[in-house]
Image (cartoon, rainbow, N blue to C red):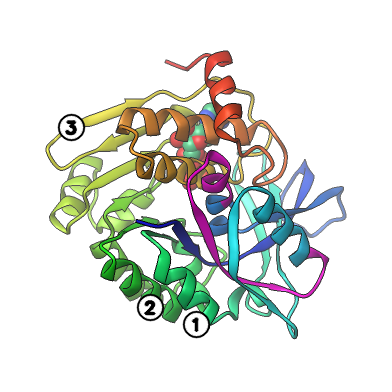
């Protein structure tokens, strides 16, 4: 049916190597690393061998080139990525706190990442696509929404499908309009990939079972709940529940785990794998990625993930 496409922010990420409260003091930083949740998702999708294309924008600078080089290397079609002559590539700074939570400083609103639009090149990519994946973070980019709406129409016309990772970030602004857009996508998504409290937030009801039931009432066909070091669970409307334990790894940098999980899961399902197989690859992609510093540095090819699965014990 055509490639999986993802619309949204492409960034570089600069990561603090020390743990602490926010960015008010000088500290060692590493990067830039190619990043942006949608870019991480699509890179993992391409790496595993699923046809993949990205829609978004970078600046005409080294940060932009680093991203384009990475995506191309990993088999992602970047013909729908604009190179903006006027605005720099978006960036994100990340620092971890002792309780494992993260602080982000984003430079997105005043960057190319938030400013792309519907062009002939984008229409051509969307016109070939069989699946659209949306990250909640992209909904707060002013330029992204019209592109997401049009891309969804294009994908649906071809009988394609939609997945949504709520991916809510406390640092990004979610006004009433964004909430409305988010809710519309929740109601249209075939596959939902929430993590933690995003399940209840997307459903608008409390309790895991009630939230899952509500999302099925709204039309979802598959819900995959990501549980970090506890693994992941897939719920299906017929009541089937498939639990996948996490792989036992030492976490060095958690950023990007959920995006890698999603990219692998969606690619595997679209390649015709069962829920169980796709969960195994998703958990492997997430776990492998947290062992390496940088948001997508640990994304794996099919062969790398097969080796990881063979050589890594599972928890629980
Ligand atoms: P998100 O980044 O969206 O919050 P998670 O943290 O749940 O998503 O990570 C996605 C998946 O990656 C998990 O379901 C799990 O399989 C894997 N993963 C994440 N963190 C770890 C970890 N510390 N150990 C093993 N696997 C992990």
The answer to which quarter of the image holds residue 257 is top right
Foreground label between 2 and 3? 2
Q: Which residue is mark 1?
A: 118
Q: How many marks?
A: 3
Region rendered in magenta: 43-63
Q: Residue at x 42, y 15 (%)?
A: 316
- Residue 142 shows in this picture: no
Q: Residues within 10 Å of mark 1 (few under 14, many from 20)?
A: some
Q: Earlier in the sequence, mark 2 or mark 3?
A: 2
Q: Are marks 2 and 3 in contact (CB under 8 Å)?
A: no
Foreground label between 1 and 3? 1
Q: Earlier in the sequence, mark 1 or mark 2?
A: 1
Q: Nearer the viewer, residue 266 or 246?
A: 266
Q: Which residue is mark 3?
A: 240
Left or right of 27: which side holds 166? left
Percent x, y of residue 58: 69, 71
Label 2 lies in ligand 1 vicinity (Cβ under 8 Å): no
Q: Secondary structure at mark 2?
A: helix
Residue 179 included in the magenta stretch of the image: no
Q: Are marks 1 and 2 in contact (CB under 8 Å)?
A: yes
Residues at marks 2 and 3, CA–CA distance in whole angstroms: 33 Å
Q: Secondary structure at mark 1?
A: loop
Q: Which residue is mark 2?
A: 150
Q: Are marks 1 and 3 in contact (CB under 8 Å)?
A: no
Left or right of 112: which side holds 45? left
Percent x, y of residue 286: 53, 36
């Amino acid at each position: 049916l055509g490639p999986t496409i993802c619309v949204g922010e492409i960034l570089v990420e600069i990561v603090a190597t020390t743990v602490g409260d926010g960015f008010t003091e000088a500290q060692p930083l590493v990067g830039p690393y190619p990043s942006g949740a949608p870019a991480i998702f699509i890179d993992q999708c391409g790496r595993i061998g699923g046809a993949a294309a990205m829609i978004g924008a970078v600046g005409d600078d080294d940060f932009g080139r680093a991203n384009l080089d990475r995506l191309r290397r990993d088999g992602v079609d970047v013909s729908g990525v604009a190179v903006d002559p006027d605005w720099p590539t978006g960036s994100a700074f990340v620092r971890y706190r002792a309780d494992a939570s993260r602080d982000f400083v984003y430079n997105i609103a005043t960057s190319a990442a938030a400013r792309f639009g519907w062009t002939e090149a984008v229409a051509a990519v969307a016109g070939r696509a069989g699946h659209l994946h949306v990250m909640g973070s992209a909904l707060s980019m002013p330029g992204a929404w019209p592109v997401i709406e049009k891309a969804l129409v294009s994908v649906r016309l071809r009988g394609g499908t939609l997945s949504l990772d709520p991916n809510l970030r406390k640092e990004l602004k979610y006004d009433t309009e964004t909430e409305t857009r988010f809710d519309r996508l929740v109601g249209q998504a075939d596959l939902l990939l929430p993590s933690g409290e995003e399940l209840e937030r997307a459903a608008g009801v409390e309790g895991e079972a009630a939230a899952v039931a509500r999302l099925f009432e709204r039309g979802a066909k598959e819900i995959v709940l990501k549980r970090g070091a506890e693994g992941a669970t897939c719920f299906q409307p017929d009541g089937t529940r498939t639990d996948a334990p996490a792989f036992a790894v030492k976490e060095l940098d958690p950023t990007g785990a959920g995006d890698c999980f999603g990219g692998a899961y969606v690619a595997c399902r679209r390649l015709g794998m069962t829920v169980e197989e796709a969960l195994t690859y998703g958990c492997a992609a997430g776990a492998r990625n947290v062992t390496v510093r940088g948001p997508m540095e640990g994304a794996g090819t099919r062969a790398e993930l097969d080796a990881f699965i063979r050589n890594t014990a599972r928890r629980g």
